[in-house]
Image (cartoon, rainbow, N blue to C red):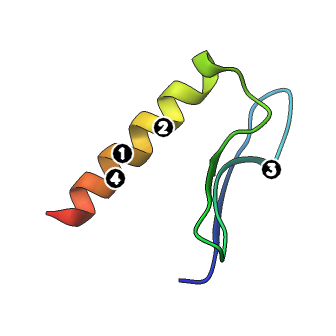
């Protein structure tokens, strides 16, 4: 995989970047959000990676 971007929508915005994986291997989590709003995204990402690794 070269790069991958996950976006989310809400009543306030559309296509906001939630998780990004770029070509250099950097993984970013909702650069626009505070720690409380990043937490569910990071937890879901970890759960997904754990599931794939099994």
Going from the N terminus, do you reach mark 2 or mark 3 first? Answer: 3
Secondary structure found at label 4: helix
- Give how far apart the Cα atoms at labels 1 and 3 are: 22 Å
Q: Where is residue 43 in the image (x, y as percent from the top left)?
A: 40, 35
Name the quadrant containing residue 32.
top right
- Left/right of residue 37 with respect to residue 44 in the rendered view: right
Q: Disc 2 and disc 3: Cα gap in Å? A: 18 Å
Going from N to C along the chain, the mark reached first, 4 or 2, is 2
Q: Residue 42 carries which label?
A: 2
Q: Give how far across and how far down residue 16 sits, in percent.
A: 79, 45
Check disc 1: other Cα within 10 Å, few if <14, some if 14-19, many if 20+.
few
Q: How crowded is mark 3: few (under 14 residues within 10 Å), some or many (20 or more)?
A: few
Query: Which numbered circle lies on residue 46?
Result: 1
Tell me which residue sits at (86%, 27%) in the image.
Answer: 12
For mark 4, does the 10 Å Cα neighbourhood hold few (<14), some (14 to 19), or many (20 or more) residues? few
Q: Is the Cβ of the residue at disc 1 closer than 8 Å to that at disc 4? A: yes
**Cα gap from disc 1 to disc 4, whole angstroms:** 5 Å
């Amino acid at each position: 995989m070269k790069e991958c971007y996950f976006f989310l929508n809400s009543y306030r915005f559309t296509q906001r970047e939630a998780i990004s994986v770029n070509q250099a291997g950097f993984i970013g989590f909702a650069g626009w959000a505070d720690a409380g709003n990043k937490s569910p995204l990071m937890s879901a990402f970890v759960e997904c990676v754990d599931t794939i690794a099994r």
